């Protein structure tokens, strides 16, 4: 009887948590309460864009690195979404060619953070708190964010569908004790285009690895891409919306300490349409099937 009551309580608790997460996801998928302004980082000497709330002092800031063969413009809705939730979201618009320098993009991310913290934005009524900084990116931009995080301490890192870089993120990750959110597409988490699993396994700080249901690694990229004509890198609206919600929820707790969103930084929390992945788990190889004897060998065996 006691066991059944305990099970009922656990079931009720799970239902409440699930309902709460679903409600928060719905809220975070929608735009936040702030009016969004757009600015040009080039005025401060760094090609790129910056999106901010209309006003606010000591705001959190996110420097975002774009993926391969994309630019800052391919993440406009993501950056605007962050700004609508009270973040200064800035993205360098460099290294857009087919042979980019990941180290240079990492340097540009750090320069972008320097601009956010060192320059009054908007009409002078927007400022960034130096202890509320995050590095984020998609694909190779996630790798560049990792490289940058190995060079400067920040409050959080978000690697969205990370891709291999040079130097490799997993080689630098053990020295990074910053908490990290790592997302991967369930459709290609084990492909050569993703290093999410080894990156999470090597991360020195607390890292959460989640696979996103039915997502591919380029699903969040907006607009037309050079490879779209070949059937690669197509935009996935559901992946984009869920990624935005997961990112804002994680940053709201990690950067701002808002306990409402604690579940998004909980490595054991169940979030709809995602699955927690243990990067240290070793997949069991299937036992080899017994080889069937050729007909001639079978006949010879029967004669003995």
Image: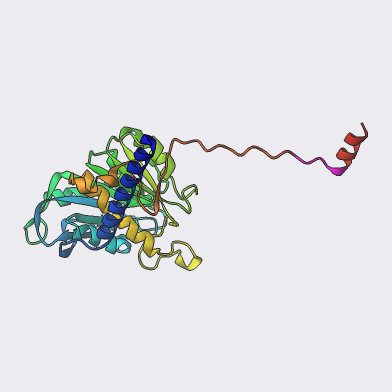
Residue 277 image point, x, y percent: 42, 43
Q: The N terminus is located in which quarter? A: top left
Asked whether the viewer can see residue 128, the reply is yes
Q: Residue furthest front?
A: 1
In-image side of 283 versus 169 (left or right): right
Which picture quadrant has residue 209?
top left
Q: The C terminus is located in which quarter? A: top right
Q: Residue furthest top?
A: 304
Which picture quadrant has residue 285?
top right
Residue 148 image point, x, y percent: 28, 43
The colour scheme used here is rainbow
> Relative to the observer, which residue lies in front, 278 or 205?
278
Residue, x 14% and y 44% (percent of image)?
Answer: 130
Asked whether the viewer can see residue 70, the reply is no
Residue 211 image point, x, y percent: 41, 49
Residues in magenta, as a range: 291-295
Residue 114 image point, x, y percent: 17, 48
Number of numbered discs visible in the structure rendering: 0
> Relative to the observer, which residue lies in front, 162 or 84?
84
In-image side of 127 versus 174 (left or right): left
> Relative to the observer, which residue lies in front, 144 or 2?
2
Q: Is residue 192 magenta?
A: no
Which SS type dominates the magenta stretch?
loop
> Relative to the observer, which residue lies in front, 224 or 287?
287
Which picture quadrant has residue 28?
bottom left
């Amino acid at each position: 009887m006691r066991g059944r009551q305990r099970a009922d309580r656990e079931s009720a608790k799970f239902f409440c948590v699930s309902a709460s997460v679903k409600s928060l996801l719905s809220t975070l998928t929608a735009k936040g309460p702030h009016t969004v302004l757009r600015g040009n980082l080039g005025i401060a000497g760094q090609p790129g864009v910056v999106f901010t709330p209309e006003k606010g002092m000591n705001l959190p800031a996110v420097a975002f690195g774009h993926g391969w063969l994309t630019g800052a413009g391919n993440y406009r809705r993501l950056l605007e979404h962050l700004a609508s939730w009270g973040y200064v979201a800035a993205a360098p618009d460099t290294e857009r060619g087919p042979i980019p320098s990941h180290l240079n993009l990492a340097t540009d991310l750090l320069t972008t953070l320097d601009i956010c913290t060192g320059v009054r934005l908007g009409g002078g009524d927007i400022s960034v708190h130096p202890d509320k900084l995050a590095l984020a990116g998609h694909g190779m931009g996630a790798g560049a964010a990792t490289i940058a995080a190995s060079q400067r301490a920040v409050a959080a890192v978000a690697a969205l569908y990370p891709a291999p870089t040079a130097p490799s993120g997993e080689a630098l990750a053990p020295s990074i004790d910053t908490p990290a959110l790592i997302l991967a597409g369930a459709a290609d988490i084990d492909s050569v285009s993703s290093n999410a699993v080894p990156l999470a396994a090597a991360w020195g700080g607390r890292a959460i690895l989640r696979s996103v249901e039915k997502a591919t690694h380029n699903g969040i990229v907006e607009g037309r891409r050079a490879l779209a004509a070949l059937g690669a890198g197509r935009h996935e609206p559901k992946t984009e919306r869920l990624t935005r919600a997961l990112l804002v929820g994680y940053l709201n707790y990690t950067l701002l300490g808002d306990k409402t969103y604690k579940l998004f930084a909980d490595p054991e929390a169940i979030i709809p349409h995602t699955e927690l992945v243990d990067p240290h788990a070793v997949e069991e190889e299937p036992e080899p099937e017994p080889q069937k004897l050729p007909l001639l060998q079978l006949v010879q065996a029967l004669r003995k």
